[in-house]
């Protein structure tokens, strides 16, 4: 029954209605009705996990998200993580999180992952980490790519938040399942190609106006950073955080 998860779904729909986001999920039948699957999503916004969750519910599945362990430190978050069978990821104990995710997949769950690891400031597909492919291979389950587009207009990295009500479409589209074959490197490359193709389809159907919009990639006439510029911003941010930690440790 999963009553807590169902309540969270209602809350998510309410939040979207309050800020004016109109979700549309397409091709939900691409997610297997039973059995384990890795649901691999692009990452452009702080709230795009809602779109991933709605994709799962449209297919009659509950998505078990992998999330930062820091988020589970608060009592209420620990409760939600436990009730929703999420997989906390501790950067200092990544092997434990990986093993937990593989076990969840082997138990027949849908595990939601962001192979890019961080929000893409360019709104293109970044270089992918190999974790999604390795988990799929070890658990012998398919990877289903999913693209969420539109939420970056509301709240994304490096741009002002726009959480007041405004009619904003959110398009969520699932792609064909990718069989767990080959090695992790080739499977990751195949996943990135599939995600990029699916992203470009969704972007063009969503629309590319107004020209110069900060939520559009440069490729479509937007003013977002290029992929190379975004990578440099990410690197600079990581370096600044590392320097701050080192200073704090003194």
Image: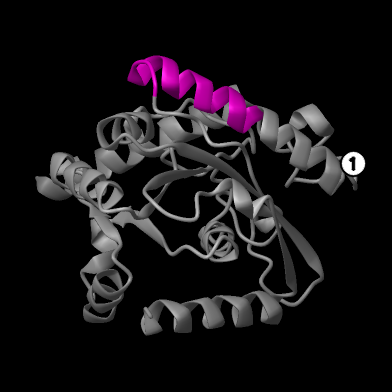
Q: Nearer the viewer, residue 155 or 96?
A: 96
Q: Is residue 93 above or below residue 134?
A: below
Residue 26 at what x, y percent from top left? 71, 53
At label 1, counting other C-alpha atoms closer than 10 Å, the crowd grade (few under 14, some 14-19, many 20 or more) is few
Work out which quarter of the rendered image holds the C terminus and state it: top left
Residue position marked by numbered label 1 in the rendering: 211
Q: Nearer the viewer, residue 33 or 22?
A: 33
Residue 61 at what x, y percent from top left? 47, 62
**Outermost residue, right side:** 210
Quadrant hosting residue 92: top left
Quadrant hosting residue 137: top left
Residue 237 covered by magenta stretch: no
Residue 194 covered by magenta stretch: yes
Left or right: 242, with 154 as reference point: left
Q: Is residue 89 above or below residue 22?
A: above
Left or right: 246, with 144 as reference point: left
Secondary structure type for disc 1: loop
Q: Is residue 233 visible?
A: yes
The rendered magenta stretch, by its main secondary structure, is classed as helix
Residue 105 at what x, y percent from top left? 30, 48
Q: Is residue 92 visible?
A: no
Magenta span: 181-196
Residue 123 at what x, y percent from top left? 64, 38
Q: Tell me which residue sits at (57%, 49%) in the image.
A: 158
Scheme of colours in the image: one colour
Q: Tell me which residue sits at (41%, 76%) in the image.
A: 5
Count of marks, rendered view:
1
Q: Tell me which residue sits at (28%, 65%) in the image.
A: 85
């Amino acid at each position: 029954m999963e009553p807590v998860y169902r309540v969270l779904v209602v809350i998510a729909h309410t939040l979207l209605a309050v800020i004016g986001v109109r979700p549309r999920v397409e091709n939900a039948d691409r997610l297997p009705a039973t059995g384990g699957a890795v649901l691999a999503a692009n990452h452009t916004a702080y709230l795009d996990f809602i779109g991933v969750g709605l994709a799962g519910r449209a297919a009659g599945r509950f998505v078990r998200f992998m999330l930062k362990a820091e988020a589970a430190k608060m009592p209420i978050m620990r409760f939600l993580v436990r009730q929703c069978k999420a997989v906390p990821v501790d950067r200092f104990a990544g092997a434990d999180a990986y093993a937990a995710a593989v076990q969840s997949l082997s138990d027949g769950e849908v595990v939601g992952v962001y192979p890019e690891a961080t929000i893409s400031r360019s709104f293109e597909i970044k270089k992918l980490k190999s974790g999604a492919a390795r988990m799929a291979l070890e658990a012998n389950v398919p990877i289903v790519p999913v693209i969420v587009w539109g939420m970056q207009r509301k709240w994304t990295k490096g741009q002002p938040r726009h959480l007041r009500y405004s009619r904003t479409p959110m398009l969520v589209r699932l792609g064909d399942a990718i069989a767990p074959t080959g090695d992790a490197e080739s499977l990751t490359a195949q996943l990135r190609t599939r995600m990029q193709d699916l992203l470009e389809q969704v972007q063009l159907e969503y629309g590319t106006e107004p020209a110069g919009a900060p939520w559009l990639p440069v490729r479509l006439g937007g003013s977002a950073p290029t992929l190379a510029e975004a990578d440099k911003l990410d690197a600079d941010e990581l370096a600044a955080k590392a320097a701050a930690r080192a200073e704090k440790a003194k």
